[in-house]
Image (tube, rainbow, N blue to C red):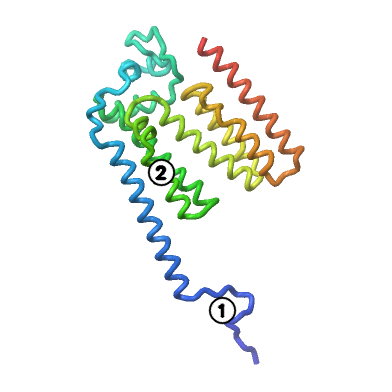
Amino acid sequence: MHTRVNRSDRPDAPYSSPTADRIDKDGHRWEVIALVTVLILALVLRLWGLDRNGWGAEYYTAAVRSMAMNWHNFLYNAFDPAGFISVDKPPVAIWLQVGSVKLFGFHPFSVLMPQVLEGVGSVWLLFHMVRRCFGSSAGLLSALFFAITPVWVAVNRTNNTDSCLVLILLLATWALLKAAEEGNSRLLFLSAALIGLAFNVKMLAAYIVLPAFFVVYFFGAPQHWQRRFVHLRWLRSLWSQRLCLGSLCTN
């Protein structure tokens, strides 16, 4: 005669009471509500009276209009309609503004809207990264403070390239933290690729995070120190080559 033993009766089966499950669900629901509230607040702060900013930095606005005319100007990062002079910044952030202009037409709102979305996206990304390491409360507080920081709000209400730069650097930071936690070289090189993309937003401003990246990966990754050292040497070579190539192209 065989006796059927329920899985819940086994001594090694984890026990979860209905009350604990309900508390977890309620906690997750309130976390989502709080996060959505913070993101809405961030969006409102960036959209409120946005029309007062006019065209933002008119230097970049002129470049957006020229680059929206044809593919030559778009790829050449042209400032003038003739495509003779290029802008003093790499093209990635301005390309996003050109895409918005192509979708919604050439007016101030379509020029400034990409930076608004980049600012809100940065708030969400910071919440996600802090929550993974320090919990929901810390993640929500960091997102809230970041969302209402006056200088960050002001930057997101213009068409400067800093909003795009910060968003990409936060993505690179996320990839690096995951690489350091898991010892995943693919995520490490993804982080390096994102730093390269950030270089094409605001050149050497993207490299300001590199010392911290090197320290976090070297002391945080679970691999042998020699393997970590080899990975970082590869990244240093890649970034050095990218810097030389970027300098040649700029000149």
Q: Nearer the viewer, residue 86 or 50?
A: 50
- Which quadrant, please, contains the N terminus? bottom right
Relative image position of residue 58 (x, y in whole percent) = 30, 18
| Residue type (three-letter) at the residue carrying disc 1 | Ser
Which of the marked residues, 2 or 1, is nearer the chain's N terminus? 1
> Residue 37's x, y, as percent?
33, 50
Number of dots carrying numbers: 2
Q: Position of residue 29 (x, y in %)?
A: 38, 61
Q: Quadrant of residue 83?
A: top left
Label 2 – label 1 distance at C-alpha: 44 Å
Q: Could you say which quadrant of the image residue 224 lies in?
A: top right
Dot 2, how many residues are within 10 Å of its Cα: few (below 14), some (14-19), or many (20+)?
Answer: few
State whether residue 103 is above or below residue 79.
below
Label 2 belongs to which residue?
A: 145
Q: Is residue 168 above or below residue 82?
A: below
Residue at (46%, 30%) from the top-left corner?
A: 165
Name which residue type carries label 2.
Phe
Residue located at (57% from left, 82% from top): 6
Q: Secondary structure at mark 1?
A: helix
Mark 2 or 1, closer to the camera: 2
The quarter of the picture where residue 239 lies is top right
Q: Is residue 114 above or below residue 11?
A: above
Q: Residues within 10 Å of mark 1 (few under 14, many from 20)?
A: few
Front one among 248 and 173:
173
Where in the figure is residue 87, as x and y percent of width and height?
41, 14
Judging by the rendered image, the residue that carries numbered circle 1 is 8
